[in-house]
């Protein structure tokens, strides 16, 4: 999917279901950069094995695992559980981990909304637009990507380089005119 399609079909409708204060340029850049990093907005299921097959434990363009922050975490976190409950109801999904995890594989609106809530659950403010390093650190804290945690120094450097490129794409899509906007 193109970034324009993701914005129109997933991010815009998801943010419309959440409190207005959650819809910021910084949030949009972060959502796009993370989706690019995790799946390139091409894979709804984690690729594993050699050759890679879509059978891994993570689902959605934002690659959430059943017991992870985007599924279980936002459902239980005091800062996000009410908004998460509203998302489940609006999307017709029972508030159970397995049901949520199954739904996000194909419900891009639900997945984008839960991804935004996972970012909201972080105690710090979102990095301002243009702060690629702060955005990277937020991604590492909230998504806790296994490839980075278990990776070699060279693999980590490769993932960081990939992030820099993805962040620039996201920033360009949202518009550099928003630099400095929270």
Image (tube, rainbow, N blue to C red):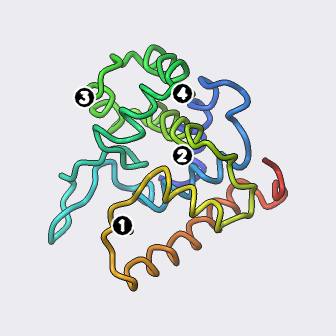
Comes first in the chain, label 1 or label 3? 3
Query: Mark 3 — residue?
Result: 98
Query: Considering only vertical position in the picture, is 72 above or below 145?
Result: above
Comes first in the chain, label 1 or label 4? 4
Query: Mark 1 — residue?
Result: 149
Residue drawn 37% across the image and 34% down it: 71
Query: Mark 4 — residue?
Result: 80
Check disc 2: other Cα within 10 Å, few if <14, some if 14-19, many if 20+. some
Question: Camera-side residue: 119 or 47?
Answer: 119
Residue drawn 57% across the image and 55% down it: 138
Residues at marks 4 and 2 touching, judged by CB atoms closer than 8 Å: no
Question: Camera-side residue: 173 or 163?
Answer: 163
- The label shown at residue 107 is none
Comes first in the chain, label 1 or label 2? 2
Q: Nearer the observer, disc 4 or disc 2?
A: 4
Image position, residue 135 (x, y; %):
62, 60
Query: Mark 2 — residue?
Result: 6
Tell me how far mark 4 sits from mark 3, CA to CA.
18 Å
Q: What element carries label 4?
A: loop
Q: What element carries label 1?
A: helix
Q: Quadrant of residue 15?
A: top right
Image position, residue 37 (x, y; %):
47, 62
Q: Quadrant of residue 128?
A: bottom right
Query: Considering only vertical position in the picture, is 63 above or below 8?
Result: below
Q: Is residue 175 left or right of residue 101?
A: right
């Amino acid at each position: 999917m193109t970034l324009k399609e993701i914005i129109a079909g997933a991010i815009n409708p998801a943010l419309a279901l959440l409190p207005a204060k959650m819809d910021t340029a910084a949030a949009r850049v972060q959502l796009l950069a993370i989706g690019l990093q995790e799946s390139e907005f091409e894979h709804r299921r984690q690729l594993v094995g050699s050759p890679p097959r879509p059978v891994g434990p993570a689902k959605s363009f934002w690659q959430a695992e059943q017991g992870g922050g985007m599924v279980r975490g936002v459902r239980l976190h005091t800062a996000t559980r009410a908004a998460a409950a509203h998302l489940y109801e609006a999307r017709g999904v029972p508030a159970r981990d397995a049901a949520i995890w199954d739904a996000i594989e194909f419900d891009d609106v639900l997945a984008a909304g839960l991804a935004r809530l996972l970012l909201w659950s972080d105690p710090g403010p979102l990095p301002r637009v243009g702060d690629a390093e702060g955005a990277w650190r937020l991604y590492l804290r909230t998504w806790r990507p296994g490839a980075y945690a278990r990776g070699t120094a060279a693999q980590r450097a490769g993932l960081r380089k990939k992030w820099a490129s993805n962040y620039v794409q996201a920033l360009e899509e949202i518009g550099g005119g928003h630099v400095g906007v929270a």
